[in-house]
Image (tube, rainbow, N blue to C red):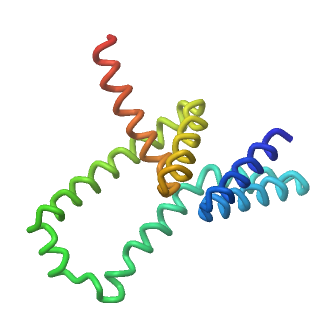
Amino acid sequence: MEEYLTLILVLVLSIIGHNMTVVYAAIIVLVLKFISQISGQVQILEYMGTHGLNLGVIVLTAAVLVPIADGTVTISTMINSFKTPIGIVAVTAGLLAAISGGAGVPLMQSNPNVVPALLVGTMAGVFFFKGLAVGPLIAAGVVYFVMSILSHFTG
């Protein structure tokens, strides 16, 4: 029952904060939780927990590739982007985000107690700073890097 209350709280806060991405996500998880509970098929929720991140990254990547498919971004546009300061910074930021996200997944899997803190931080960023709810994965990667650096100083 506590799971439902927590998800409903996230849903209500997301509605108050006008973050429809989190609203939809909370509704999907609530529905999956309800279906898995009444049907006894816990695999539905487990599948989302195991493969949902990969499915989300696939959909996100497909959306980013649309400008290539519709001709807005061409090979020459891509090559020219490397010749500008903002293009170089964008490549660097993309590289760091990918590395950070890659480090974040194993951290969340091996240390699940960090997930609630990541969610609270992401929700605060969404509610108070008009951010997007893509933060937990990259935030986990940042946590991984900070903890790795600190471990060198603490032994």
**Residue at image point 84% right, 59% down:** 35
Q: Is residue 74 left or right of residue 129?
A: left
Q: Is residue 104 left or right of residue 152?
A: right
**Residue at image point 60% right, 61% down:** 19
The residue furthest bottom is 71
Q: Is residue 149 above or below residue 58?
A: above
- Could you say which quadrant of the image residue 61 lies in? bottom left
Of 72 and 22, nearer the camera is 22
Q: Which quarter of the rendering shows the N terminus?
A: top right
**Residue 106 spot, x, y in % from top left:** 47, 38
**Residue at image point 16% right, 71% down:** 81
- Could you say which quadrant of the image residue 152 lies in? top left
**Residue at image point 50% right, 46% down:** 136
Of 14 and 78, nearer the camera is 14
Of 80 and 107, nearer the camera is 80
Of 28 and 10, nearer the camera is 10
Q: Is residue 114 left or right of residue 7?
A: left
Q: Is residue 44 above or below residue 81?
A: above
